[in-house]
Image: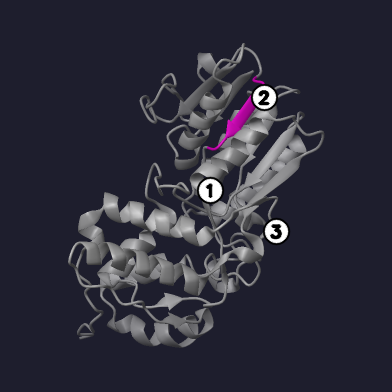
Amino acid sequence: MRILVTGASGVVGTEVAERLAAETTGRAGSGIVRTARRAGAGDTGPLTAPVPWDIGAEPAPDPLTGRPWDVIVHTAASTRWTMTRQEATDANIRTLRAVLALAGPDTHVVHVSTAYVGGVRAPEDLRGAEFEGYRNGYEWSKAACEEIVAGEHRGPATIVRPPLVLGRRGDGAIGRFSGPYSLFPALVSGLAAVVVGDPDGFAEIAPVDEVAEVIAGAALGTPPGSPRTEVISAGQDSMRLSDLVRITCDTLNTFRAEHGVDPIAQPPTVSTDSWNRFFLPLAAQWLSPVQQEAVKLLAMFQSYTSMSEPFEPTHKVADPGGVMAASVLHWARSKPRQALGRTVPWTLIDAA
């Protein structure tokens, strides 16, 4: 079985390739080939070096062409929430089409999407008009990619939808701190002076090793007769926003106490409507440029960490609170200077 894994240097791609290699060791005719944008990217462990390929910007290199793959696991993507429509098209839609050009009619394409494609569409103040109701260009492009995989690929297809991805269940380890990890230093530094959202809203997360398990299971399993969608979620057992903030602060404070550092205070929660209608318009003129950027960054998480309904899982995540705590602790141990930093309360600046 010849398997191509794109995005070999990414958080999910790295984990998937390692799991596939472990599960195919000793199988006759099995081979895992990885590709990454730059030579040497993701070049760790027993796997052979990734084939460098800037997908969509240059032709596929010779090692990836010649005959169709048995399985293509497409994890490569730009997950930036700030992409324009054109940037999202170039980064995700154009790259998908380039990858599908390597697939034959019997190739099982396992496409990694996002669970938020199936969530509630964003309100108007989250650029819904530009992205047809989706929260941002990342979501919009992933929805378009799902349609392409299901509608244009001639062979079997599995779409995997993970929520926000955090570290491994056991030790919280992860290849790179991105996305939701920006919340941790913001809480410690005091830039997250308030948490905006519904305290009882659902906050969906999944450990990267379980996401990789679902993807690898699809890749090595029997190809579906029609496009199949796997949703990774804790469902009704998901954390609520208040749980996420409490677990994060408690874990950070335990780590700080072990090092003789004062605890951080758990910030108050303000509803999204109140924040956008009243607090932010009144406070904006008094915020420093750094505080303004922090507000913009954290605002992107509003609709992700306080959903009115959870996702309906095909693979259920157990004990998401434990995953959260392990991920926070791993970050703190990896970034002790940030985790043990001093909290600086917000202060007014001179508007004149």
Above or below: residue 86 compared with residue 103: below
Task: Answer whether residue 32 is magenta in the image.
Answer: no
**How many marks overall?**
3
Name the N-terminal-most of marks 1 and 2. Answer: 1
- Which x, y percent locates residue 96? 60, 36
Horizontal side of residue 229 vs 24, given as left or right: right
Q: Label 1 amino acid? A: Ala
Horizontal side of residue 47 vs 315, given as left or right: left
Numbered tag placed on residue 312 in the rendering = 3
Few, some or many C-alpha atoms within 10 Å of disc 2 (few <14, some 14-19, many ≥20)?
many
Q: Residue at x 37, y 59 (%)?
A: 182
Q: Label 3 amino acid? A: Glu
Magenta-tinted stretch:
69-75
Q: Label 2 amino acid? A: Ala
Residues 232 and 195: in front is 232
Q: Is residue 251 visible?
A: yes
The residue beneath circle 1 is: 88
Above or below: residue 149 compared with residue 193: above
User: Which element type, helix, strand or loop, lies under badge 1?
Assistant: helix
Are the residues at dot 1 and dot 2 in contact (C-beta closer than 8 Å)?
no
Few, some or many C-alpha atoms within 10 Å of disc 3 (few <14, some 14-19, many ≥20)?
some
User: Which element type, helix, strand or loop, lies under badge 3?
Assistant: loop
Tell me how far mark 3 sits from mark 2, CA to CA.
30 Å
Are the residues at dot 3 and dot 2 in contact (C-beta closer than 8 Å)?
no
- Image depth: mark 1 or mark 3 in front: 3
Quadrant in the picture for residue 352: bottom left
- Image depth: mark 3 or mark 2 in front: 3
Q: Residue at x 74, y 35 (%)?
A: 152
The residue beneath circle 2 is: 103
